[in-house]
Amino acid sequence: MEKFPPIDTTYFYTYECVEPYNKFFYRTIEEIKMTSTSIYCLLRYGLKSDPDVVKDEYTFVTINRKSGTVEEFSIPCESGMTPIGYGLKDDMQEKIQPFLFFKKKAHYGVRVFGL
């Protein structure tokens, strides 16, 4: 805690209140979707102050709304692929899947993960 900057009360109740602390947090929820049975999150492991999608790691988290059990899966990026973005695909029928938008050589593609 001693490394944290002092609290600035002028930022209370504003979006800027977290700005001085961003460099200390390495895990953020990038996207969230819900169904009647589960909550789905796309987590990013990387400093928010350094928005470099290429070197960050992403995971897909499923939380069962009834039992509270949590499952987390790493979203892989194959050798030769340069990640451009990640997201959650919703088929509007209680199925949420993570996807990766990537570049490989001179081609672009989207890979949907069927977990």
Image: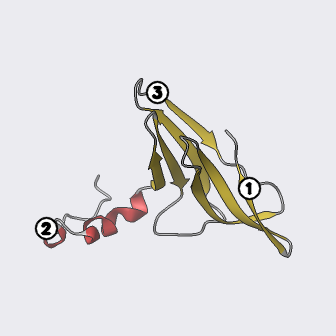
The reply, left or right, for residue 13 in relation to residue 43 is left
Q: Are marks 2 and 1 in contact (CB under 8 Å)?
A: no
Check disc 1 and report the residue beneath it.
111
Residue pictured at 61% horizontal, 60% vertical: 86
The reply, left or right, for residue 107 in relation to residue 26 is right
Check disc 2 and report the residue beneath it.
9
| Image location of residue 89, percent across then percent down | 59, 53
The C terminus lies in quadrant: top right
Q: Is 24 located above or below residue 59 in the figure?
A: below
| Mark 1 crowd level (few <14, some 14–19, many ≥20, 10 Å Cα) | few
Q: Secondary structure at mark 1?
A: strand
Separation of disc 1 and disc 3 at Cα? Answer: 27 Å
The answer to which of 69 and 90 lies nearer the viewer is 90
Marked residue nearer the N-terminal end (2 or 3): 2
Q: Is residue 78 visible?
A: yes
**Residue 42: mark in rendering:** none
The reply, left or right, for residue 69 in relation to residue 54 is left
Q: Is residue 26 visible?
A: no
* Amino acid type, residue under disc 3 in the picture: Thr
| Image location of residue 11, percent across then percent down | 19, 70
Q: Is 38 located above or below residue 105 in the figure?
A: above
Q: Is 99 located above or below residue 5 in the figure?
A: above
| Image location of residue 69, percent across then percent down | 46, 27
* Amino acid type, residue under disc 2 in the picture: Thr
Residue pictured at 68% horizontal, 58% vertical: 100
Check disc 3 and report the residue beneath it.
69
